[in-house]
């Protein structure tokens, strides 16, 4: 018997070991591990996973589990903060491209008017310029199919005209002066996405030789810092002695680009921003002392739509007493998102930490978990409360006193409060003006006027001479007739009151149609209240 006992025990032990090992292996495999940015994540199988598998295998009728999964994921993430988001596979490329340095397309800026795609401008060096597409052309065919009507949307146009580099798209164009549809076959190419809308010089006190460089940054994308430094160098070469950095309506983007920009203005060791979270180790960004603009006077412009990376930059300048912040309280988005991919090509942007300014202020405005709709109403509530017009109407949740580097008091609790508040000026606003602007009739008229006079307007190569021509052209009666056909009856009293604002806006739009943003912003900003206040500070106040 002894002869058989040992082999039998050995077999039993091996069998038990196999079963235990298999059970452990199954448990480990149920926990799907993956690495993101050097960190190990595990996604254990949950009741939701089990339910979806059960539905897929046993439900009475066939179902689209992928679609249901996306809906479940969205609903779960919605119960977190307002900035965490689940991104389905089909949306991920478009979402990521918002901050990329380029995309593949045909190289035109377009506007949809009267259910038709109209080319506002052709991007220099792009595929469309090379084959003869012109500003003012109307794209009425795409790949031999009609491309007009009520179903035309911005999303549909981008989906049709963008595509992989090297692929072809056929378009049919209607051009002023011709009755036939002109066919073009365009090979898609790389189209740069610019962060710097415009850079130009504002003349200060001529007796003092003051020249102010103005740079408008619309977002913080992959190439923002490089574009910004190139713009600053150009302005310095033109004799700029002080600078205005305009971050109004800049909703943010990549934090590292804002940090690199801030580094250019701060001394060695100055704190730029820090972040920390429950499972996110504290991260500090400090200036390295190599910045090229550490001594020049600086003003930063912000408004209610300046968010995230814009607030990091503005907060760093304010807390280090490096710049004066002018405008209105910023949005208040100070949450750090980490994008984590899933195996099916979708991803989740999960909030993992909060940003803090050098003085310790949280940029993030208050929110309640899972109540995104209330959060989205915040700007509307601010407007109705009067915050857009008066600093006295600003309500800050955090009563804590924070101190800047030089001991000035600043407040936290949501966004950056400017040092110099400039409310919206409504003295020239009338019901007539509000109607024509809100219904985009100013924009539509400007495009149509440009289209009718494009040959004549194109003779002017700078915004100053083009504006002089437009002021002499006296197009106002044409505009009134245009708006009347659209259903807005003229009101002589209101028109007279709003005329300076109306003329400035339409002229700026026409200039943009001919000279792009490099012509639009100098004209538009010349009479802007916030810019005027910034110039006033730079020319009269020591810093």
Image: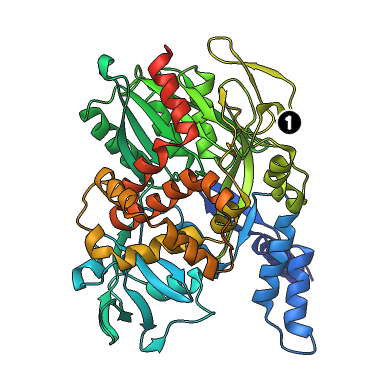
Dot 1 alpha-carbon crowd within 10 angstroms: few under 14, some 14 to 19, many 20 or more: few
Q: Is residue 203 left or right of residue 306?
A: left
Q: Secondary structure at mark 1?
A: loop
What kind of colouring is applied to the model shown? rainbow
Measured as percent of width and height from the top left, residue 469 is found at 27, 50
Residue 12: x %, y % from top left: 75, 68
Locate residue 422 relative to residue 237 in the image: left or right: right
Horizontally, residue 185 falls left or right of residue 354, namely left
Residue 305 locus on image (x, y percent): 57, 43
Residue 446 in view in this figure: yes
Indicate the quadrant containing the N terminus: top left, top right, bottom left or bottom right: bottom right
Residue at the extreme front of the image, as rendered: 492
Residue depicted at x 62% and y 23%: 360
Placement of 4 over or under 307, stated as above or below: below
Q: Nearer the viewer, residue 209 or 494?
A: 494
Q: Report x, y in % for residue 440.
A: 52, 60
Query: Can residue 17 be seen here?
Result: no
For the point 41% across and 25% down, the residue is: 535
Whether 422 is drawn above or below 484: the answer is above
Q: Quadrant of residue 296?
A: top left
Residue that numbered label 1 is attached to: 395
| Residue situated in front as seen by the camera: 43 or 29 | 43
At horizontal 42% and vertical 53% (from top left) the residue drawn is: 506
Q: Quadrant of the C terminus?
A: top left
Q: Is residue 278 left or right of residue 327?
A: right
Q: Nearer the viewer, residue 423 or 156?
A: 423
Between 290 and 216, the residue placed more toward the observer is 216
The picture quadrant where one finds residue 174 is bottom left
Figure check: 117 above or below 179? above
């Amino acid at each position: 018997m002894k002869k058989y006992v040992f082999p039998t025990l050995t077999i039993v032990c091996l069998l038990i070991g196999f079963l235990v090992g298999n059970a452990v292996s199954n448990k480990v495999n149920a926990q799907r591990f993956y690495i993101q940015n050097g960190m190990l994540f595990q996604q254990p199988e949950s009741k939701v996973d089990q339910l979806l598998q059960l539905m897929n295998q046993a439900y009475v009728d066939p179902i689209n589990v992928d679609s249901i999964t996306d809906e479940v994921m969205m609903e779960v993430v919605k119960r977190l903060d307002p900035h965490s988001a689940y991104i389905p596979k089909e949306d991920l490329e478009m979402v990521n491209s918002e901050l990329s340095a380029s995309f593949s397309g045909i190289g035109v800026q377009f506007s949809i008017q009267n259910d038709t795609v109209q080319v506002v401008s052709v991007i220099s060096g792009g595929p469309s310029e090379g084959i003869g597409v012109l500003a003012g052309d109307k794209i009425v065919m795409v790949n031999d199919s009609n491309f007009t009507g009520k179903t035309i949307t911005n999303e549909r146009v981008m989906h049709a005209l963008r595509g992989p580099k090297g692929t072809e798209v056929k378009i049919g164009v209607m051009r002023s002066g011709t009755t036939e549809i002109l066919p073009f076959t365009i090979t898609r190419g790389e189209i740069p996405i610019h962060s710097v809308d415009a850079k130009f010089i504002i003349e200060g006190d001529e007796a003092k030789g003051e020249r102010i460089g103005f740079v408008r940054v619309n977002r913080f994308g992959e190439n923002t810092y490089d574009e910004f430094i190139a713009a600053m160098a150009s302005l310095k070469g033109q004799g700029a002695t002080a600078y205005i950095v305009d971050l109004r309506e800049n909703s943010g983007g990549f934090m590292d680009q804002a940090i690199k920009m801030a580094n250019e203005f701060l001394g060695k060791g100055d704190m730029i921003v820090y972040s920390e979270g429950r499972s996110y180790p504290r991260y500090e960004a400090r200036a390295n002392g190599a910045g090229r603009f550490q001594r020049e006077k600086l003003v930063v412009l912000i408004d209610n739509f300046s968010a995230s990376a814009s607030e990091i930059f503005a907060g760093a300048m304010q807390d280090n007493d490096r710049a004066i912040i002018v405008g209105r309280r910023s949005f208040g988005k100070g949450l750090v998102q980490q994008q984590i991919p899933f195996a099916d090509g979708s991803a989740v942007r999960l909030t993992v930490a909060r940003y803090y300014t050098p003085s310790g202020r949280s940029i993030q405005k208050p929110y309640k978990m899972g109540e995104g709709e209330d959060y989205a109403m915040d700007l509307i509530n601010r407007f109705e409360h009067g915050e857009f017009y008066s600093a006295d109407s600003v309500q800050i949740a955090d009563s804590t006193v924070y101190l800047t580097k030089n001991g000035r008091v600043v407040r936290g609790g949501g966004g950056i409060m400017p040092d110099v508040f400039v409310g919206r000026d409504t003295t020239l606003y009338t019901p007539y003006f509000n109607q024509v602007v809100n219904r985009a009739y100013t924009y539509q008229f400007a495009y149509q006027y440009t289209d009718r006079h494009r040959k004549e307007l194109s003779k002017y190569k700078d915004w100053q001479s083009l504006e002089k021509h437009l002021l002499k052209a006296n197009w106002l009666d044409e505009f009134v007739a245009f708006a009347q056909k659209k259903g807005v009856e003229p009101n002589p009293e209101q028109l007279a009151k709003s005329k300076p604002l109306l003329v400035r806006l339409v002229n700026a739009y026409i200039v943009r149609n001919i000279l792009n943003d490099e012509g639009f912003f100098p004209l538009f900003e010349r009479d802007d209240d916030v810019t005027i206040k910034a110039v006033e500070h730079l020319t009269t106040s020591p810093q």
